[in-house]
Amino acid sequence: MAVTAFDLPAGRTLGPHYHIIEFLGGGWEGEVYKVQERSTGILRAAKLFYNRPRRSQPLLKYAKKLYKLRACPIVIQYHHRGLATVHGLQVEFLISDLVEGEVLSKFLERQRGKRLPPFEAVHLLYSLAQGIEQIHFVGEYHGDIHSDNVIVKRRGLGFEVQLLDFFDLGKPSKLKLQYDVYELVDLFYEIIGGAAGYRVADANLKSIIKGRKRTLIKKQFRNAGDLRVALENLEWEE
């Protein structure tokens, strides 16, 4: 039986060791919740996986991918897996570190005009590009970069970012790494305010977004490293 939503309430138990604190976000493969370990009070994150037809062992693939990327600070660290009964079905879940911060979509909702000023927006994109670059460096990809999948926290002169979710599109390839770049650019477009923000954006921002035309994006940014270098070399007018 395919499940497309869990909608677990706060206070509900999850397996024998955890109870739900709040919903954090979701993607194609499942939903992420803040949970508390019942015996210790330690807060963790739990990702519950949808039981989709023709999907084999999604949690095992996900856990192995997290382990491969364990040295990448943008990736939340994996602890262990478990089983819980949800709506009468056996559901797999994965426990990982709970990171401080706010889901990016909610963070943007709180900003004036629901967008960030240009210089802050570039700093946020830079933090994301740096993190995704490390994933690309080990030959992996993310596959599902959007504002509901990013945890953000202001820190010093910039931002700390971490990823809530990955998407399994099969074996890594240049095309899948390139798709991550397209999604980074689309996310940047959202961060500056979408169409309204792009219309009034300066040349620096437009040089990154390129009208969201994938042929132009691909020509300059083949991976997240190319995007990071471009951001480091922006020249701002006085």
Image: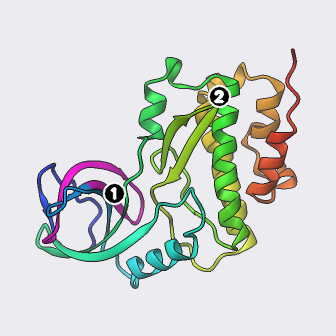
Magenta part of the chain: 15-34
Classify residue 81 by image quadrant.
Answer: bottom left
Q: Which residue is mark 1?
A: 32
Q: Is 25 part of what is drawn in magenta?
A: yes
Q: Residue at x 82, y 53 (%)?
A: 226
Classify residue 117 by image quadrant.
Answer: top right
Q: Quadrant location of the N terminus?
A: bottom left
Please say if 161 is above or below 180: above
Q: Residues within 10 Å of mark 2 (few under 14, many from 20)?
A: some
Q: Residues within 10 Å of mark 1 (few under 14, many from 20)?
A: many
Q: Which residue is mark 2?
A: 120
Q: Secondary structure at mark 2?
A: helix
Looking at the magenta stretch, what is its main secondary structure?
A: strand
Q: Is 198 part of what is drawn in magenta?
A: no
From the viewer's side, name the closer residue of 178 and 92: 92
- Name the kind of residue labelled 2 in the image: Glu
Extreme residue in the top direction: 238
Q: Is residue 72 left or right of residue 41?
A: right
Which circle marks residue 24 in the picture? none
